[in-house]
């Protein structure tokens, strides 16, 4: 027999999951422009210039998982995201990518975003930190 407390708890959990699921961001670019940052021994491009709405996609070409950290970014700054979510589907500023996985963000307005990629390495310290920058410039007109 299920007690009332269990029913209440499950009802609240289902309601929260539905609310968070309905408020998530789109997972694709609105401009259909995708800029890849390939993560290998180094980043394919540590400085990237995009326009508002373009998709910045991080691609893990390494044999081990990597961690992409984009601090100081909130959902108010984004027009799309994929892979930067927690277990409930809410945005978080970290994506953990297994080999050959991707994660992506689209930014709404002109801004400069600094990010880092943390990757395991056999070098001293065991963790390689690869810094990068995304400059979101101008507007979407002219494309």
Image (cartoon, rainbow, N blue to C red):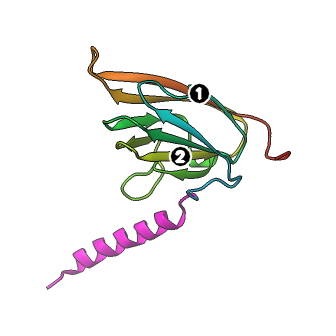
Q: Is residue 32 above or below residue 57?
A: below
Label the magenta part by its dominant secondary structure: helix
Q: Residues within 10 Å of mark 1 (few under 14, many from 20)?
A: some
Which residue is labeled 1 in the image? 133
> Does residue 70 appear in this view?
no
Q: Position of residue 138 (x, y in %)?
A: 79, 37
SS at badge 1: strand
Left or right, 92 with reference to 143: left
Q: Residues within 10 Å of mark 2 (few under 14, many from 20)?
A: many
Left or right, 47 with reference to 88: right
* Residue 47 in magenta stretch: no
Q: Residue furthest left?
A: 1
In the rendered picture of this protein, how many numbered marks are placed on residues?
A: 2
Q: Is residue 100 above or below residue 43?
A: below
Instruction: Say whether disc 1 or disc 2 marks the residue closer to the N-terminus.
Output: 2
In the rendered structure, which segment of residues is drawn in magenta? 1-25
Q: Residue furthest top?
A: 124
Q: Is residue 91 above or below residue 117?
A: below
Q: Residue furthest right?
A: 142
Which residue is labeled 2 in the image? 104
Q: Position of residue 19 (x, y in %)?
A: 48, 67
What residue is drawn where x is 46% and y is 55%? Answer: 90
What residue is drawn where x is 27% and y is 17%? Answer: 125
SS at badge 2: strand
* Residue 9 in magenta stretch: yes
What residue is drawn where x is 72% and y is 42%? Answer: 109
Q: Position of residue 135 (x, y in %)?
A: 67, 31
Residue 38 vs residue 115, the one in the foreground: 38
Asked whether disc 1 touches disc 2, contact meaning CB atoms under 8 Å apart, the reply is: no
Q: Position of residue 127 (x, y in %)?
A: 32, 23
């Amino acid at each position: 027999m299920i007690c009332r407390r269990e029913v209440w708890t499950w009802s609240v959990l289902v309601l929260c999951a539905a609310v968070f699921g309905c408020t998530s961001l789109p997972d694709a670019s609105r401009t259909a422009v995708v800029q890849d940052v390939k993560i290998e021994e180094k980043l394919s491009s540590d400085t990237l210039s995009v326009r508002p709405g373009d998709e910045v996609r991080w691609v893990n070409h390494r044999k081990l998982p990597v961690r992409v950290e984009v601090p100081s970014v909130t959902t108010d700054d984004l027009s799309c995201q994929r892979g930067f979510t927690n277990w409930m589907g809410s945005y978080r500023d970290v994506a953990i990518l297994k080999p050959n996985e991707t994660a992506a963000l689209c930014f709404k307005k002109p801004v400069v975003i600094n990010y880092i990629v943390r990757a395991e390495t056999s070098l001293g310290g065991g963790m390689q930190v690869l810094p990068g920058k995304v400059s979101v410039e101008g507007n979407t007109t002219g494309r």
